Amino acid sequence: MSLQKFARRVVFWFVLPAFLCMLVVHVIPILWGGYLSFLDLDIYTVTQWSKAPFVGFRNFLTVFSPRTDTGVRYLRSIGNVIYYGLVTIPAGYFIGLGVAMLLNRKFWGRTLVRGLILLPYITPDSVVYNVWRFIFQARIGLVNKYLLFLGIIQEPAIWLVGDRAIYAVMVASIWKGWPFSCLVLLAGLQSVPPELYEAARIDGASKWQIFRYVTFPMLKPVSGTLLLLSAIWNFHAFNQFYILLGTDPGKAHVPSTFILQEAFVNFHFGLGAAMSLFLTVVVLSMTVFVLKIRKGVPV
């Protein structure tokens, strides 16, 4: 056996465990969910799922139809997650950028501060969002306490139910997520050659001009990847809504929480699989887009 063939076999056996794990954890469940999305699978047929009626695209027509209750709520959940992302992603980016620019300067204790700002991001979601749930409580929450003290509101506002619920989740999510943006952007700032700043100062550029024509353009590759990844993760939003708002957020549903309720509370497994498959296709499409952007391949 030649050395080249031996090396190929060694590589194959090293890759095989990872391939089997990906197959069991990702590929098979996706294919299985795709199959279930074409069945009328509910609490009455789940015990004999192999004999469940095949309904074709009826589940997809139901979840995307504005004439059905399920369709209205699912379409609203998609609108909610898009609205949620349009607020939280830019807010987290600009807060992270501002803090990253401060941490890029030299000052005493900079390493300690860099470690401290990561605390919100590394703290488990269950801890962070339960604390924010307490903060947004109507009677004893700190938000209403200070708003009443400042005279902004005259009576305690209800933040975790109704139309205001999504804004409470946005605030908590921004607080939780901006340190990651800061970490990524700080790495991008440290890769900017100091000679560019020195040349700009020699040419008489102001601080704003240096940021606009030097710093921001040099951060474009990092910023693009960060924003695209944030958009992908945005469609996975679940923990913050589930922990803050409970199992039934009402009008503040996002696709993940609505799929949970429809499939495992209402036991409409076929509809849940159809909604999950659509969400999977969206996320995979965005992932392919990110990979092509990073490789410089035209989309």
Image (tube, grey):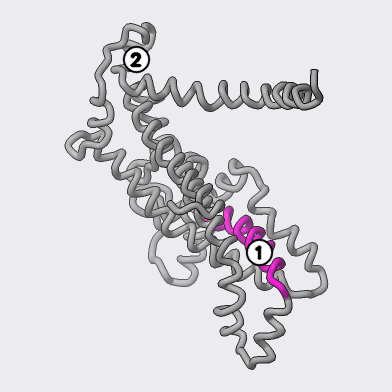
Quadrant of the frame with the N terminus: top right
Residue at 72% over, 21% down: 13
Residue at 33% over, 49% down: 79
Residue 235: which quarter of the image? top left
Q: Position of residue 250 (x, y in %)?
A: 34, 41
Residue 77: which quarter of the image? top left
**Secondary structure at numbered mark 2:** loop
Q: Residues within 10 Å of mark 2 (few under 14, many from 20)?
A: few
Residue 266 lies, with reference to residue 130, above or below; the image says above
Q: Is residue 96 within the magenta segment?
A: no
Label placed on residue 26: none
Residue at 63% over, 58% down: 179
Residue at 55% over, 53% down: 294
Q: Earlier in the sequence, mark 1 or mark 2?
A: 2
- In front of the other: 167 or 17: 17
- In front of the other: 119 or 137: 119
Q: Which residue is mark 2?
A: 43
- In front of the other: 140 or 61: 61
Q: Which residue is mark 1?
A: 188
Q: Position of residue 49 (x, y in %)?
A: 37, 10
Q: Can residue 149 be seen in this snapshot?
A: yes
Magenta stretch: give its range: 172-193
The answer to whether 7 appears left or right of 137 in the picture is right
